Image (cartoon, rainbow, N blue to C red):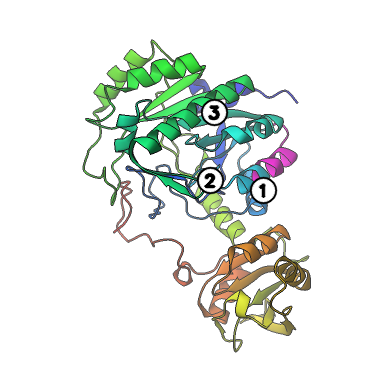
Amino acid sequence: MALDLTQHPCFNSDARNHAARIHLPVAPRCNIQCNYCNRKFDCANESRPGVASAVLFPKQAANYLRHSRKIMPRLRVVGIAGPGDPFASPEETLETLRLVREQCPEMLLCVASNGLKIEPHVAELARLQVSHVTLTVNAIDPSIGAAIYAWVRDGRAIHRGEAAARLLIERQEAAIRALKAAGITVKINTIVVPGLNEDHVVEVADKMRELGADIMNCISLYPVQDTPFADKGEIASDEMKRLREQLSGYLPQMSHCARCRADAAGLVGAPTDRELSGIMLACANGWNGTSSERPYVAVASMEGILVNQHLGEATRLWIFEAGDGDPKLVELRYAPEPGGGFQRWKELAESINDCRAVVVSGIGRRPRWVLEQTGLTVIEIEGLISHALGSLFRTGDVPASMRTQFKACGSGCQGSGVGCS
């Protein structure tokens, strides 16, 4: 199917007032530590990359998209932009893109990356008709890059200083060449740091033009709490305007960037609809719009009152369904014997395939992955089963106070962009 590439609101300013986009937050890990980035905070009023109120697994993301399309008829673009880097966890990213392409053959797909690990996946991106890719390139001089990046992780190796910056720059250049050879539109994001790379961005723009990039988006540093650049300040808007005018001689400039969250949805620059945020959180907790096919929830508990057991230690699971008041206990099901590895978790998933979620106090990465592949949602909390499941059956979500993944938003937050303290 031919895609209308003009409908991407980040690459075409004429589209931003009528074409909506949605970011699916399926990539929590990152392989670079930038000195301006802090992903620990989340606030509903905060708009900046690296912020998301939940992390979805691929099937959850596809479910979220399916429900979101019903209330967002102007949706034209589905993107993956974190909250980490999409290719620090390529399996989740590519599986999500496959599911989206199956569901939405007409939709534009895009990803935003630092470029370190994207090049090996360019052929698959092209096969999935990913039409737009954004790479963040802050320097082409390793001595400048060394001041911007604290470290770069390549596999198990951690690189620092100019060696880290040099590796990243080389990978970014290779990625741009591969993306352009595959016919993919490339946007370059450059964070302009006062006193560090503001005089270097002309060289960046010239090099990006030489490599074949299509458009550039220069963004002033956005100081974030608890980062090395927290006190550097922002560049004045008139100075950024002058800089963009200068750079336009090398590449077309994007001037309407809203510094979107990793879970942004709707029109560029507009706040995300609260209904969409609610759907995303519900999907992260196993809601799929119906309870008839999977009416139960499994709980790892020592006594059936508290969620207080790691899944790996559970010899049995307590199975609940919605009741008139408190959740109703249906039965106890015994878990497979320990020591079976992958097969153990596969058997466990099959034994609770009439459950939509499993609620535990802890779980390893492999069992989580196996359970999620069968459509189960894993919820890690601690506290009263009745409190958690009462809310889950009623609203599709568990109380935020029972979770530990995100720092709670403090009262009185005004969306300063530095998180809540």
Image spot of residue 315 (x, y percent): 67, 83
For image coordinates 32% across by 13% down, the residue present is 246
Near mark 3 (Cα within 10 A), the count class, few <14, some 14-19 or many ≥20, is many
| Type of the residue with mark 1 | Ala
In depth, the one of 379 and 287 nearer the eye is 379
Q: Nearer the viewer, residue 21 or 300?
A: 300
Which of the image's four quarters has the C terminus? bottom left
State the residue position of label 1.
62
At 27% from the left and 26% from the top, the residue drawn is 237
| Position in image of residue 137 (x %, y %) | 42, 29
Circle 1: element type:
helix
Q: CA distance from mark 2 to mark 1?
A: 20 Å
Q: Secondary structure at mark 3?
A: helix
Bounds of the magenta segment: 96-106
| Up-down relation of residue 28 to residue 367 (above or below) | above
Extreme-top residue of the structure: 249
**Image quarter of the N terminus:** top right
Where is residue 405 shown, x and y percent of the image? Answer: 46, 63
Rendered image quadrant of residue 118:
top right
In the picture of the structure, the residue carrying the numbered disc 3 is: 175
Percent across and percent down for residue 211 are 50, 17
Mark positioned earlier in the residue sequence (3 or 2): 2
Q: Is residue 331 magenta?
A: no
Tally of numbered tags: 3
For badge 3, the amino acid type reads: Ala
Amino acid type for the residue under numbered disc 2: Ala
Vertical placement of 24 versus 370: above or below? above
Q: Which residue is mark 2?
A: 88
Marks 3,2: beta carbons within 8 A = no
Position of 159 compared to 113: left or right? Answer: left
Q: Can see residue 74?
A: no
